[in-house]
Amino acid sequence: MKKTPHASPAAAAFVLAAALLGAAAPAVARDNPVDPVSNPDKLDYRDVEARRPDFKEPFLRDGVVSRPERFREIKPGITQAQVLAVLGQALKQQRGALGTEWDYHFKFQMPQSANYLVCQYKVVFDDSQAVRSAVWRRRQCLDLLPR
């Protein structure tokens, strides 16, 4: 007669605790973060989704390296041609709730660091194609701009 191995009481307790913790883990929120300072109109940004084969890529979202002082030139009332001259071609253009939206991804070097932060930036134009507003997805990006 063959003996069946039994798990130790400690291993059984570990498996039970892991199962209970897994069941009680909170769901991951997929909502767009809204920051009243950097994005007061609650404009929407597209998230990046990764599936297992995509993990081999070094970055899922990358941006053009930029100097933060350039963004002082983007003000309400300037034209699309002026925005193009300062920021270049938008990554994406679409119609949004407040008008035509141009989406950009920029990469800023972090202060006192060799690391970079990729920032999403949106310029919104009114019906006359003048800038209505320009907003950052996250406040960390707004905070990198010189005052």
Image: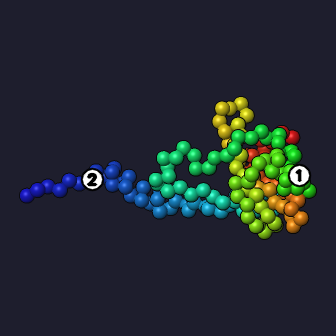
Q: Which residue is mark 2?
A: 7
Say which label, 2 or 1, has the lower sequence index: 2
Residue displayed at 49% across by 56% down: 51
Drawn side of residue 133 relative to residue 10, left or right: right
Q: Residue flagged by tag 1: what amino acid is it?
A: Lys
Residue lying at 82% horizontally and 55% vertically, measured from the top left: 134
Of the pair 134 and 3, the residue shown nearer to us: 134
In the rendering, which numbered label is found on residue 75? 1
Work out whether residue 131 or residue 81 is closer to the camera in this orientation and state it. 81
Kind of element beneath mark 2:
loop
Way the structure is coloured: rainbow
| Residue depicted at 46% across the width and 59% down the height | 22
Amino acid, disc 2: Ala
Q: How far apart are the alpha carbons under marks 2 and 1? A: 67 Å
Quadrant for the N terminus in the image: bottom left
Q: Residue furthest right?
A: 77
